[in-house]
Image (cartoon, rainbow, N blue to C red):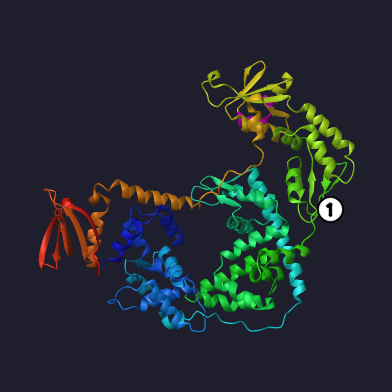
Amino acid sequence: MTSVLALSHQLSALSDDDLELVLEARDISPGGIKNFLNLAESLLAPESLDRVLSRLDRNALAAVAILFSAHPDEPPLSLGEIQEIITTANPQHKLPFDWARRTVGSLNTLALVRLTDTGVQIWPEVTQALTLLQERGAPSLLELTHLAPPSALEAVPIEPVENADRHAAEAAFSLLRTTRDLVIELQDSPAPVRSRGGLTLPASKRLSETLQIDIDDLPLTMKLAERAQLIVETAESWVTRPEADAWLLLSPAERWVTLVSAWAASLPPNILETLAQHPRHIWDDALDTLVPWLFPASADFANAQAQSIRAESRYIGALSGSAGSSFTRALLSEGPTAAAATLAPLLPTEVSQVYIQPDLTIVSPGPLRAALDQQLRGIATIESRGLAPTYRITETSLFRALNRGLHEEEIRSFLRNLSLTEIPQPLDYLITEAVRRFGSIKVSTLPSEASSVSPLTAITASDPQQLETLLVDRGLQHLSLKRHDQDTLISTMSARVVLLSLHEAKYPAAPGENELVAAKNDAPTTPFPGPSPARQANPSITHLRERLRNNQHSHESDPAAGGLTHQLTTAIKTKSRITVSLVAPNGTTHKYTILPTSLSTQRLRGLDELSDVERTLPLAWITGIEPAES
């Protein structure tokens, strides 16, 4: 049996979602892959198998070792037999009752096993790759099946655990602030991605500057938010999910628990179980002991994993120095409620009122409650973040609020309730003047019959001199403004783009009557109403999957054009027995199991071992081939 041919059939039978999971799990490069046979060859290539085996955790390697040890002439092992073998090898270590099902499932997602009606086998190429790993120092097959994790040595705390809690709580607060700002920023303005996936460089710079974090910390921040189901990458941009609105309204401790629970769920279970069993002052040492044991096939990969987990743990407040935080320990041992209760007293208290200054700045004496912060950002611009954030109200920010449908009295009422003092006279005057001036320039979409160009946006003004000013404003050149008549300018840009550009240039523009509803809907909203969107694959993975399916479907009526010749050539080269299905010109169907020997002049020749004859089969009669059962 040729592994390449068998794997190509197994892959082609997968659902689209399962196929994308395989492509993502194996990190396949799309280049050069046109059909499922190419894909199978790539997955079974020695360098590809070496890379994936080096990164398997101990549970997956234990299953590979069990399948490796099975005699090739014996029937495939069933899941029950695999579970029995691993249980016998670990008499003192309790394993989940479905260990075999879950572990073999993960190997199947990595395309490392062949699933048959009677059991599970690993491909011969996987056996060869594991042998090479052992020659380079990987543990023996017997050692790989021992799953009881090692215990870290008890150490004397270097510093009081209370100090670790204080530093960890500071990291947790920083994580909360950064993630909240990220969500709010993406609600206002999604971040575009490249065609092959990942943020564009301008978007990365914009987000890092807005969040006031190092650009190198941005990927981890976004990964944590994505795991917590707050943001998602679409084909065009990073956007928020519906769950983000509810998350913003949680208490700070609850928001942290949501983020860290999702992070913890992404770690191998042995790490969490072992940390929960050890005193938290030795968690750093426990990682040094546990991670190399958990990833025994490659010391380099294990070290990289340990460094990554340690860096993430410190970033989220799970680890400080060499000790774990009490609230993370509570999360692992007692659950989310206990963790939130432990963390809450360590975080700064949120406030519900602020000081409004005569210079139009707003100073919050502490972190502002999330709902109030979100409302305030609708009429002010945040200037500094941290324990005592500051905001500034400007004419432009007020125009933005009015454009979203807020009325003068709503703005005044909100600020009166929010402020610890009276509204200063300069702010009172600014609001009055902004309301008076707002709408002196109107932006609306012209009816389609008014122009042959679509869309066409019209700009009118109460003062004709304002139109002259717009025409000569170099900052608005990208709008390509032209005079339509004495009272109107036109632009080929959409009304929304024109409106935003005028606001950025500090003009008192407002939507026309036809644009009013659309303007109100420009307020921060989630782009996915209703249920959460399905899992979003990397765009390059989606394109590869579509290419494979298109090739498969386009050749269903002509198997020879769909890679049949390639499959037969592979079977001949590897001396693999195959079952050939064919339809004769008179309509009769036949199936032959042969060992193919040659392919020429549109005819396949092969030895039918059952009848002990050489058969010659016209290629045009063949409707399909598949690996022969062993």
- Residue at left offset 20%, top offset 59%: 580
Q: Check if residue 471 falls in the magenta segment.
A: yes
- Residue at left offset 79%, top offset 29%: 435
- Residue at left offset 53%, top offset 78%: 293
**Element carrying mark 1:** loop
Q: Is residue 133 visible?
A: no
> Dividing the image into 4 quarters, which one contains the N terminus?
bottom left
Name the one closer to the observer, 415 or 588. 588
- Which of the 4 image quadrants contains residue 169? bottom right
Q: Check if residue 476 falls in the magenta segment.
A: yes
Residue 595 position (above or below residue 602)? below
Circle 1 Cα neighbour tier, 10 Å, few/some/many (<14 / 14–19 / ≥20): some
Could you tell me residue 57's position as x and y percent?
Answer: 49, 72
Q: Find disc 1 in the rendering and name its residue.
A: 365
Check the image and name the residue furthest to the left.
613
Give the total of numbered labels. 1
Q: Is residue 530 visible?
A: yes
- Which of the 4 image quadrants contains residue 273? bottom right
- Which of the 4 image quadrants contains residue 475? top right
Could you tell me residue 541's position as x and y percent?
Answer: 44, 53
Horizontal placement of 436 versus 107: left or right?
right
Name the one closer to the observer, 525 or 168. 525
Could you tell me residue 10's position as x and y percent?
Answer: 33, 60
Residue 219 position (above or below residue 373)? below
Name the one closer to the observer, 514 or 297. 514
Could you tell me residue 259's position as x and y percent?
Answer: 64, 59
Callout 1 amino acid: Pro
State which region is magenta. Answer: 470-479
Horizontal placement of 382 versus 60: left or right?
right
Residue 562 position (above or below residue 343)? above
Name the one closer to the observer, 422 or 544. 422
> Dividing the image into 4 quarters, which one contains the C terminus?
bottom left
